[in-house]
Image (cartoon, helix red, strand yellow):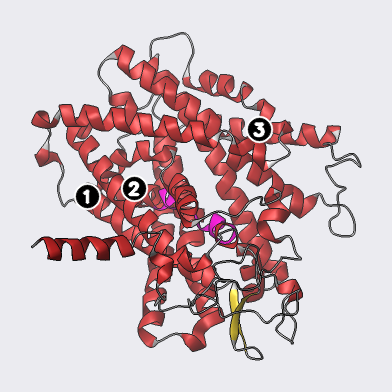
């Protein structure tokens, strides 16, 4: 018995991220990555017909484990997405660090709105949290597979693209493909910034509903504290905030789940059913999709892993953990509060002092989370418009000494103010989250990865694989259209409900 248990334990251990690179990957779409000792991206800019790296040594077959441990090291000659848009990449990361980054991307602030999805979706919303995680994990893998091409001369896979935009340009052309994906990324990031401002307003008015300051005024106050983001020039300055964001997130989750478990004898089991609200369920699907959107970061993340052969396994475990936690969190929170579940679950906490403390911690986390998507969006905009002629029509935002020009700082400040104005205009957190998920989320996470993969890898795919990815595209298009319509309709209806803190129950 003990021997059998030990065997099961060893088998489970072999599937952990730290061990998953010790065996060949058998994913059906493509093997990818470079060897264990490779430290930089194999750039397409030095991949010529001879199939040799910068040191004259042929590239190794990507994703296999039959290489000598002392293989050659390759240096990238091109910037790629991370260096070109977000600054220098810095040190390489292992699979655990990569998994932590993915987990932070898909387990962020917006988990506080998932119980609201169960309010309208019931068990179907809980199921969708697992199903969407499976789809997003798959599309993340095939998106990264599109970064690689088979070199007939060397008989090896080589990383010939660096970013989501590069993939789009290869499939749809530079004039349309790259610009389309770039716009979608900018919209996604700016909308995330807007959601953080809306969340701050929701949390503060939920803590002080009878105070002299209304919801929109709280958003303005929060934005004043975000103005220093306009002076950010390096990603390292942003990354120092991640640890405290993560700690605050863990603390909030422990508090909410602990409260739900204490209230377990009072759980409203009958409130969770297999029926759903047809008018609001598409909104909940948008919320779920938005909560799993990480595709725009995956090419950069994979390119900066020490051992890219472990990328697939890392992505599997991070999404399995996210699906289990999100489904459990949303289900337990809704069982606790039932039909009284609000857009931000912390506003359901009964004791005013307790709720104020939790909400203030969440406000701090939201303020600390804002700089990363803001910084990424600002750099994407500057890379697209402000690199100087002949690359772009407008001059560079940086002076010769490397400092931001005065007008560039003014534009960045204006960008912060624009996010505030949009947040004030659409002050409904869950509905706005559903709209974004239905719009950019479905395209970036469902439709485009599958379309690009079939465009680039169609000859290597089996018929079941093609059918599966066409099915994902159909789901993405259908849910996107229905979700946009339902979210927009609910937002219009919500404007007839007075602030400061509306309880949105569209009929």
Mark count: 3
Q: Where is residue 368 in the image (x, y as percent from the top left)?
A: 54, 30
Whether the residues at callouts 1 and 2 have beta carbons within 8 Å, the answer is yes
In the image shown, does 171 or 298 lie closer to the viewer?
A: 298
* Figure check: 199 above or below 94: above
* Figure check: 248 above or below 98: above
Q: Residue at x 41, y 59 (%)?
A: 18
Q: Residue at x 32, y 56 (%)?
A: 320
Q: Position of residue 434 (x, y in %)?
A: 42, 46
Q: Position of residue 250 (x, y in %)?
A: 38, 34
Q: Earlier in the sequence, mark 1 or mark 2?
A: 1
Residue 320: mark: none
Q: For the C terminus, give its image quadrant.
A: top left
- Range drawn in magenta: 289-300
Residue ID for mark 2? 284
In this view of the protein, can residue 267 be seen by the observer? yes
Residue 276: mark: 1
Q: Which of marks 3 and 2 is nearer the N terminus?
A: 2
Q: Which residue is drawn at 36% across and 76% down?
A: 468
Q: Label 2 crowding class (10 Å Cα cut-off): few <14, some 14-19, many 20+?
A: many
Q: Residue at x 69, y 61 (%)?
A: 80
Residues under labels 3 and 2: Cα distance? Answer: 28 Å
Q: Check if residue 418 falls in the magenta segment.
A: no
């Amino acid at each position: 018995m003990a021997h059998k248990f030990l065997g099961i334990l060893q088998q489970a251990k072999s599937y952990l991220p730290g061990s998953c690179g010790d065996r060949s990957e058998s994913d059906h779409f493509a093997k990818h990555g470079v060897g264990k000792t490779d430290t930089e991206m194999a750039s397409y800019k030095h991949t010529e017909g001879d199939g040799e790296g910068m040191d004259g040594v042929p590239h190794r077959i990507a994703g296999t484990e039959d290489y000598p441990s002392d293989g050659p090291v390759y240096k990238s000659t091109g910037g790629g997405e991370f260096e070109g848009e977000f600054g220098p990449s810095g040190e390489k990361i292992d699979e655990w660090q990569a998994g932590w980054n993915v987990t932070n991307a898909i387990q962020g602030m917006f988990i506080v709105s998932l119980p609201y999805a169960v309010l309208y979706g019931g068990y179907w919303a809980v199921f969708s949290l697992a199903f969407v995680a499976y789809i997003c994990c798959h599309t993340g893998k095939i998106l990264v597979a599109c970064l690689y091409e088979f070199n007939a001369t060397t008989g090896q896979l080589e990383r010939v693209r660096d970013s989501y935009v590069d993939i789009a340009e290869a499939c749809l052309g530079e004039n349309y493909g790259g610009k389309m994906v770039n716009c979608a990324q900018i919209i996604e990031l700016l909308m995330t910034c807007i959601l953080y401002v809306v969340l701050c307003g929701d949390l503060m008015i939920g803590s002080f509903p009878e105070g002299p300051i209304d919801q929109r005024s709280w958003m303005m106050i929060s934005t004043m504290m975000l103005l220093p983001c306009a002076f950010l020039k390096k990603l390292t300055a942003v990354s120092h905030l991640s640890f405290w964001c993560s700690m605050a997130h863990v603390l909030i989750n422990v508090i909410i789940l602990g409260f739900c478990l204490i209230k377990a004898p009072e759980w409203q089991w009958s409130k969770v059913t297999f029926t759903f609200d047809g008018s609001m369920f598409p909104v909940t699907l948008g919320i779920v999709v938005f909560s799993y959107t990480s595709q725009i970061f995956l090419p950069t993340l994979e390119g900066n892993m020490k051992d890219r052969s472990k990328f697939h396994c890392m992505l599997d475990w991070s999404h399995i953990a996210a699906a289990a936690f999100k489904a459990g969190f949303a289900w337990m929170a809704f069982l606790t509060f039932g039909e009284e579940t609000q857009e931000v679950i912390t506003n359901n906490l009964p004791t005013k002092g307790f709720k104020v403390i939790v909400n203030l911690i969440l406000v701090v986390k939201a303020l600390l989370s804002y700089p990363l998507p803001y910084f990424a969006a600002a750099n994407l905009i500057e890379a697209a418009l402000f690199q100087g002629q002949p690359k772009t029509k407008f001059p560079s935002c940086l002076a010769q000494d490397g400092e931001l020009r005065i007008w560039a700082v003014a534009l960045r400040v204006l960008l912060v103010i624009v996010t505030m104005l949009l947040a004030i205009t659409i002050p409904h957190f869950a509905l706005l989250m559903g709209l974004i998920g239905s719009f950019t989320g479905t395209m970036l996470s469902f439709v485009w990865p599958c379309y690009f993969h079939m465009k680039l890898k169609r000859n290597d795919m089996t018929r079941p694989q093609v059918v599966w990815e066409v099915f994902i595209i159909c789901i993405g298009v259908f849910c996107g259209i229905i979700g946009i319509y339902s979210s927009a309709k609910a937002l219009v209806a919500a404007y007839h409900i007075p602030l400061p803190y509306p309880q949105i129950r569209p009929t």
